[in-house]
Amino acid sequence: MSGFFVLIFVSLIGYLIYFNTVKSETFINSPYNTRQDTFSDRVVRGKIISSDGEVLAQTNISEDGTEERVYPYSNIFAHVVGYDSNGKSGLESEANFQLLTSHSFFLEQMQNEFRGEKNIGDNVITTLNANLQSTAYYALGDRKGAVIAIEPSTGKILAMVSKPDFDPNYIENNWDSLVNDETNSSLLNRATMGQYPPGSTFKIVTALDYFRKKGSFEGYSYLCEGSITMEDHTIRCYNSTVHGQEDFYSAFANSCNCAFADMGTSLGGKSLRETSENLLFNKTLPLKNARKSSFTLDGSSPTALVMQTAMGQGNTLVSPLHMALITSAIANGGILMQPYLIDSVQNNAGETVSTAEPVEYKRLMSDNEANLLGKLMRDVVESGTASALSGREYYVAGKTGSAEFDENGSSHSWFIGYCNADDPDLAVAIIVENGGTGSEAAVPIAGQLFDAYYYG
């Protein structure tokens, strides 16, 4: 019996040692653990820094010891970096534990504690690129919408912009007006939480489902007369354009609504749902505080709804982040990398505490499927609705979208795509609310982003 109790005692001691050396930081780092807030009594909050060395958030200390959190870029990183008063959001929330933990040289920490002074918290080095972020911010201008840019091969998020925005330097002063502003919803990160009809960007999903069920894009033929009617429901191409005789490739490049409504009815709601959920619709997305996209078709859905959904309307809702993830997977041979915003953590002397490594999240499609979708998207740029991006020193693959959101035909402008199509460097998703067609508002923003990536 005594041996049994000795074994229990030794096991408890062993677990306590394991917990304190291995698991304690994970436990403390939980956003539900309020113990983190007490760290600020003895640690000065660290900096948030861009991948190109720009300070995005820092704590200034006045002569009387008063601390002030400062955001040098004001509104530009508002949603992704977030704020640290009236609660926390963005990276200020996600990296709260790291920012309030000090890995300074232990003698320095002992000296500060002896003097009754605070230690300096660790710095969080993000994946964000200040130049790309600024380009996206100014390209979007004073319009509502979102821009997100991801490195497909790693999952690094290089830019994330949402508008309307706010200045985190004055979040306390403007808090009441911000939380009560139902017109602009300026605190909402539209890139991760926005829910929009995907418009013709969804034709990528329909195209993938068609290939999976039919085995090929070859042999498809459709005569577009500007409209299609089934069971008393009519769908028209943009401006009732008559595209004439089309194969699959020209139907995709022309973004022919009639052809894709025709495809959708041949596939059916159950098939489209299966492929959509393979691409993470109705699923939790692999990034904190990202809202699920929704897809509602099933085998009993009416023909009219299937027609609408197949060409990007209907009840489907999606976030810019989700469309960026699908685009990244296509650019990366079908493999979606885990998206992330924190590249490394350093102490105040610049010594590395931890480094993030790219991780494969999930294969969304085969390499062959990704290549075929990429070919369709290259045709959109070379001879279709995104031709404004052709003829550059780098090749672009993409898909435009015009997502109608009211009975008057008003539409959000979408573009998703990637640059250096043969060896992709950057995947983007852009939405401009009430921006018209994809080629009108979103495509020019993509062009500015790609140019900034290559030419600075």
Image (spheres, helix red, strand yellow):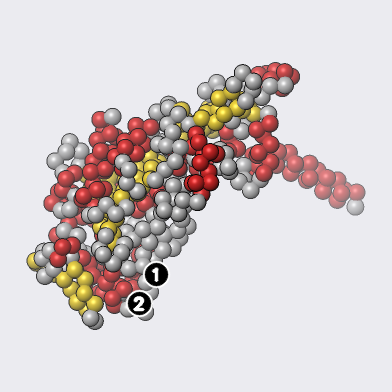
Residue type (three-letter) at the residue carrying disc 2: Ser
- Give me the residue at 61% from left, 33% from top: 100
Q: Position of residue 305 (x, y in %)?
A: 31, 73
- Give me the residue at 14% from left, 41% from top: 391
Residue, far left: 244
Residue type (three-letter) at the residue carrying disc 1: Thr
Q: Position of residue 233 (x, y in %)?
A: 24, 77
Q: Which quadrant of the rendered structure holds the C terminus? A: top left
Of residues 76 and 103, the one nearer the viewer is 76
Q: From the image, tell me which residue sits under label 2.
A: 301
- Give me the residue at 29% from left, 77% from top: 303
Question: Real-space Cα distance between discs 2 and 1?
Answer: 9 Å
Q: Does residue 151 appear left or right of residue 168 in this picture?
A: left
Which quadrant of the structure image shows residue 84?
top right
Residues at badges 2 and 1 in contact (C-beta under 8 Å)?
yes
Of residues 162 and 198, the one nearer the viewer is 162
Q: Secondary structure at mark 2?
A: loop
Q: From the image, tell me which residue sits under label 1.
A: 296
Residue, far bottom: 231
Of residues 302 and 438, the one nearer the viewer is 438
Which quadrant of the structure image shows residue 237?
bottom left
Q: Is residue 328 visible?
A: no
Q: Does residue 320 appear left or right of residue 179 in this picture?
A: left
